[in-house]
Amino acid sequence: MTGYHGLKLHSNNGLVAGSTIHLKLSLFFAGLIIGTSASTTARADCDPAVPVSGDTVICTGNPAGFSSNGQGDLTIDILSGTNLNGPLTLSNIGTLNAKSAGNLQSVTLTDNGVATFENSGNINGGLVVVGNGIYSVTNNAGASINAAFSFTGDSANTITNAGTLNNGITINGNGTTDIFNKAGASLNSGIFVTGASETFVDNFGTIQSTTQLGTGNDTIVNHDPGQINGFIDQGSGNDLFQMLGGRVNADVNQSDGTDRFELSGGEVTGFLRAGVDNDVMIWTGGLIGGSIWVMAMTMLSSRD
Ligand SMILES: [Ca+2]
């Protein structure tokens, strides 16, 4: 009825019309205040705080941290501008899809089945993955992980880096690990594998220190403009190194196992040592600066 009277007064009396406008403006600002208040409450945390399987949790504002455990299926979306001022801990989740464009402290993913984590922001306390599942971490261009970045377990790992990994990548386990380091991306440390995880490194970016692969059958492919600036040891196992372009500003040791070194472009400034067993070097282009210790070498006619 109030609304009806307001309308009636407005239509009949210019003086009261001003009051009507005032009323309308007051209601407008009241709405704004209510809206802002409700919005602020919702934005101050991760919502829903206690998710069930199938939920999508959205984090904004400055939550104290977030933890979830045991859902069959869970999606986490940490929006740009969020500061998660405590740990993010996600465990025993069947299928986990998490992405963050915010500033995170430590992230720990434990014993999940299939977990995907996409970082477009900063993780200042590291990202630690533990378990035997299928795990994928993507660090986008402009994003960074500034402390330990590790996988422990007999897991199938896929790591795609287009940004900065300040502590490199550490793997402890016997599964598989595929690493894609994109052009313009930086590992400001190395790749450290302990165990038999079969590791595949596809490098277009920069790897600044030692690459120590484990006892599995490992492959490194270096493309132009990729640069590896630390000693490479592929460990035991039957390892393959394909030097297609770019630079390796260090020595390469392929260690025990039946290894294969294919040099077709770019430059290795140091030596190549293939270790014991029947190793092969195929040289069709590119340069190597140091000595070559290998059982058999093939220099094809296409070599410059
Ligand atoms: Ca190896």
Image (spheres, grey):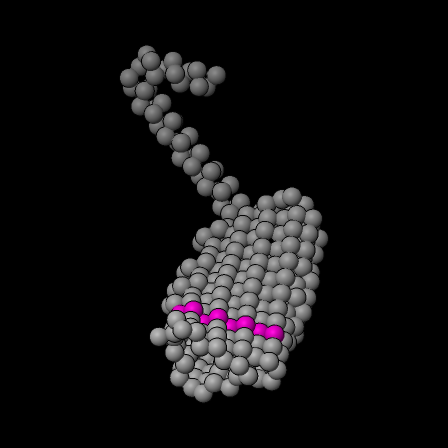
The residue sitting at the left extreme is 14
Query: Viewed as shown, does residue 1 lie left or right of 131?
Result: left
Q: Foreground: 148 or 232?
A: 232
Q: Position of residue 248 (x, y in %)?
A: 42, 77
Q: Position of residue 180 (x, y in %)?
A: 50, 63
Residue 169 lies in quadrant: bottom right
The residue shown at (31%, 23%) is 18
The residue shown at (44%, 34%) is 31
Query: Viewed as shown, does residue 106 lie left or right of 283?
Result: right
Q: Position of residue 82 (x, y in %)?
A: 48, 54
> Can you say whether 1 is above or below 99 in the image?
above
The residue shown at (44%, 77%) is 299
Q: Foreground: 62 or 289?
A: 289
The residue shown at (66%, 66%) is 175
Please give the range of residues in magenta.
Answer: 238-245
Asked if residue 3 lies in the magenta stretch, the reply is no
Query: Viewed as shown, does residue 14 lie left or right of 251?
Result: left
Asked if residue 243 lies in the magenta stretch, the reply is yes
The residue sitting at the front extreme is 301
User: Can residue 128 be seen from the camera position used here?
Assistant: no
